[in-house]
Amino acid sequence: MKDATTIFTRHPANPILDPKDFPGIAKIFNPSPAIYEGKTILLVSIVPHSIGWGTGETRVAVSTDGINFTIEDKPFIEFDTTVAPYDLANKHRIDNRITKIDDTYYILTPVAVDGHLGPCTILGKTKDFKTYEPIDIITLPPNRGASLFPEKIAGLYYKLDRPGGGTGSLGTIWLSSSPDLINWGRYRPLIRPYNHLNGTKMGPTPPVKTDRGWLVITHNVMTPCDGAHYSIGAMMLDLNNPAKVIGKTASWLLFPEEDYETRGTVDNVVFPCGALVDEEKDEIRLYYGAADSRVGLATGSLSATIEACLKEL
């Protein structure tokens, strides 16, 4: 393996979720994956024709085989907008990050905040993907893409932040910690754009624990003369000291190349919000948004991805 670009293979059924198959929906994109009762769950970002382009919502998509999904008819993430702090968090509840801790699935949702510098991140939870409970706002705006670690490290919870919301040169990733998932502090810079693929910005997804470190799938943005190109990469963090980056991909794992990735609402985008890892199969399932319009699936070797990070391929 000379670089990381050969590790992942797109599923032949791609795009596995396409709005043309779901009447009333204009866009289906940027899925966050989980396994629940043996089924694959995706929290998909949805824009129905009825609510317009600037206001997205999150719905639950369910599959028994990981390929063919049904999508719920109603939004999953809802707030009582008559009660603070959710009275202004009324638009664009999309691009979730799911982390399972014990028997609870915690969901970090970036939301637009009317009249303020948004977005901020709202922490919520579910145990069954039928009922959703918001907990609190856990990032200052602008912050888009915050992602939780799945367990405590040295007695503290940790999360990855993207202060600045990924705007321009502010597309860096920071680390913060908390005793209780609500009160966060000890902010530390972790990594900033480091090569041509993420020269504009980069952002995290929930870390996956491996025996060689924390694997973090990332999105990376470069902006050549024809506009932004979103690709997918990865990095590794030290298991006991997540403030230490021990490796990162120098090339992409996935780059927008297929027609359904290069043409859409936003051209030239492959965008992850998480990954499903099967260590026994040595497999990563990567569900991703394609051109902010559809959902694709790519699979690749876990060990090869880790090796690419550690050798910076």
Image (cartoon, rainbow, N blue to C red):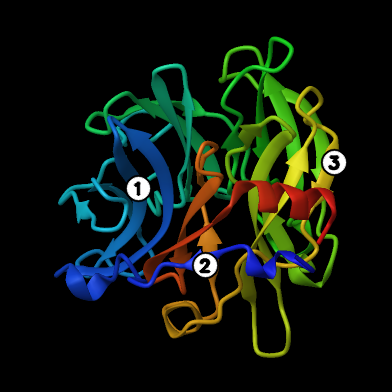
For label 1, the crowd category at 10 Å Cα-Cα, with few meaning under 14, some 14 to 19 and many 20 or more, is many
Residue 238 or residue 189, whichever sits in front: 238
How far separated are the C-alphas under marks 2 and 1?
20 Å
Q: Earlier in the sequence, mark 3 or mark 1?
A: 1
- Counting from the top left corner in percent of width and height, residue 137 is at 51, 31
- Residue position for label 2: 9
Amino acid type at mark 2 = Thr
Q: Amino acid at mark 1?
A: Leu
Q: Circle 3 sits on which residue?
A: 246
Task: Work out how far the residue at label 3 is from the one at label 1, CA to CA, in angstroms.
Answer: 30 Å
User: Residue 131 at what x, y percent from top left?
Assistant: 24, 29
Q: Amino acid at mark 3?
A: Ile
Instruction: Provide the secondary structure element on which disc 3 rests.
Output: strand
Q: CA distance from mark 3 to mark 2?
A: 26 Å
User: Is 38 placed above or below 309 here?
Assistant: above
Q: Secondary structure at mark 1?
A: strand
Q: What's the residue at 25%, 48% (across, down)?
A: 63
Q: Is residue 159 above or below residue 43?
A: above
Rendered position, 51 above or below 304: below
Is residue 84 something that shows in the picture? no
